[in-house]
């Protein structure tokens, strides 16, 4: 739609004869035209949006150290909100429903800690005590492999200095991992963070879940009326994508963690429980969980079992788990409902972790879902606009 200047009344020319204005404005007037009300309003919206984004990033940067329990509480409230809505629909007060749901979730978490924490701690202790053995075994394996390469390719390709460098680097890497694990188990988690997660998170989750509909209604009331329908459409799409991804990935992580832990333990792997649970927990990063568990499991099995048949059993467990995940679990739980590409999720997780640490990892997927939905919305508008469909230019 083109904007045209209306014919000006005669009296305007009489009052301003020196300007010599015509119906078509020119650049020779020598004065800068003032922006109209619509243009000023558009600039104000852009400035307000930019200031809001800058304030949000600044707040994340300044308060990243204390935001973890609040972000975890918000995620819990978001996941429990559909259940609270159902309980409220059958007549239960919202506050009571929120209290029962939050209490139930944290009771299950405490029960899990009571049942599995001693066993996990014992296996972590065994793992740290075995680090020197793993370093020595890896040193021998690398040395023998390099000697074989030297015999095969010739000493001019694989010389003595290269062998010493490879062995030294591998030993240094495993030593660093051992030190990091020792620091973590020996009290690396600060008491304040532990208390905050244990005490503050349930309280904040309860209040957020209780007041969730009121908060959404308040935010809805702040949206400019002109963009209300579009904003609601985008928000509903983000909620659909994010809810499907979070629920699906949570179930996938639980199923894979349980399968790997039980299967590896039955296969006789000494640290099968911790390896299996670790592989399952980090399966929310596409392909990383299974690949990490496969490498660690094969390495531990090669050092523990005397025959390659036992090592092959461990490898087969991860192959079966990955196959079931890719062809049965993932299509049934997620399928095409989640429009989050694996590469986009991996990039978002690493970018969030690099920017804000563990807090950034928690916020990465919601941010990726929101950015993806908004990008697809604007792409649809672009493909339907004259800017894309104009063939005369």
Image: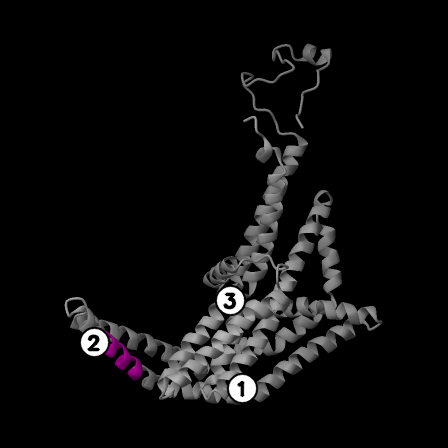
Which numbered disc, 1 or 3, marks the residue closer to the eye?
A: 3
Q: Position of residue 133 (x, y in %)?
A: 32, 86
Is residue 274 within the magenta segment? no
Which numbered disc, 2 or 3, marks the residue closer to the eye?
A: 2
SS at mark 1 in the image: helix
Q: Position of residue 18 (x, y in %)?
A: 61, 11
In the image, residue 354 above or below residue 312: above
- Please indicate whether residue 84 sits to the left or right of residue 153 in the image: right
Residue that numbered label 1 is attached to: 117
The Cα atoms of the two marked residues, 1 and 2, are separated by 43 Å
- Please indicate whether residue 307 sits to the left or right of residue 389 in the image: left
Mark earlier in primary sequence (1, 2): 1
CB contact under 8 Å: marks 2 and 3: no
Mark earlier in primary sequence (2, 3): 2
Residue that numbered label 2 is attached to: 147
In the image, residue 234 above or below residue 203: above
SS at mark 3 in the image: loop
Please give the range of residues in magenta. Answer: 136-146
Q: Which mark is residue 285?
A: 3
Q: Which mark is residue 91?
A: none
Is residue 142 within the magenta segment? yes
Q: What's the residue at 52%, 63% (across, down)?
A: 360
CB contact under 8 Å: marks 1 and 2: no
In the image, residue 85 above or below residue 143: above
Q: Residue furthest left?
A: 156
């Amino acid at each position: 739609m083109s904007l045209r200047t209306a014919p000006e009344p005669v009296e305007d020319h009489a009052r301003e004869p020196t300007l010599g204005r015509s119906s078509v404005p020119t650049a020779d007037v020598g004065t800068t035209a003032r922006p109209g009300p619509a243009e000023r309003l558009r600039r104000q919206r852009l400035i307000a949006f930019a200031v809001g984004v800058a304030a949000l990033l600044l707040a994340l940067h300044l308060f990243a150290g204390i935001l973890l329990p609040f972000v975890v509480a918000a995620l819990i409230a978001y996941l429990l909100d559909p259940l609270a809505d159902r309980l409220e629909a059958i007549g239960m007060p919202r506050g009571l429903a929120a209290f029962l749901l939050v209490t139930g979730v944290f009771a299950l978490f405490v029960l899990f800690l009571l049942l599995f924490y001693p066993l996990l701690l014992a296996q972590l202790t065994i793992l740290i005590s075995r680090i020197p053995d793993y370093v020595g075994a890896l040193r021998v394996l690398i040395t023998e492999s390099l000697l074989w390469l030297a015999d095969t390719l010739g000493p001019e390709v694989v010389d003595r200095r290269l062998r010493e460098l490879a062995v030294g680097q591998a030993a240094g890497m495993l030593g660093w991992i051992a030190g990091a694990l020792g620091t973590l188990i020996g009290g690396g988690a600060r008491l304040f963070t532990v208390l905050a997660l244990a005490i503050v998170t349930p309280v904040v989750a309860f209040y957020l879940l209780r007041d969730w509909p009121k908060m959404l209604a308040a935010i809805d009331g702040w949206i400019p009326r002109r963009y209300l329908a579009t904003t609601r459409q985008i928000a509903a799409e983000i909620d659909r994508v994010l809810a499907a991804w979070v629920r699906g990935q949570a179930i996938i992580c639980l199923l894979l963690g349980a399968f790997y832990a039980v299967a590896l333990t039955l296969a006789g792997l000494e640290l099968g429980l911790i390896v299996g649970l670790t592989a399952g927990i980090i399966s929310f990063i596409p392909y990383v969980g299974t690949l990490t568990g496969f490498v660690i499991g094969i390495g531990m099995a090669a050092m523990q079992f005397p025959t390659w048949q036992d090592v092959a059993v461990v490898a087969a467990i991860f192959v079966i788990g990955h196959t079931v995940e890719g062809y049965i679990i993932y299509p049934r739980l997620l399928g095409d409902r989640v429009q989050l590409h694996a590469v986009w999720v991996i990039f978002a997780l690493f970018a969030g972790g690099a920017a804000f640490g563990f807090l950034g990892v928690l916020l990465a997927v919601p941010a990726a879902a929101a950015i993806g939905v908004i990008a697809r919305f604007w792409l649809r508008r672009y493909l339907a606009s004259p800017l894309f469909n104009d063939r005369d230019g």
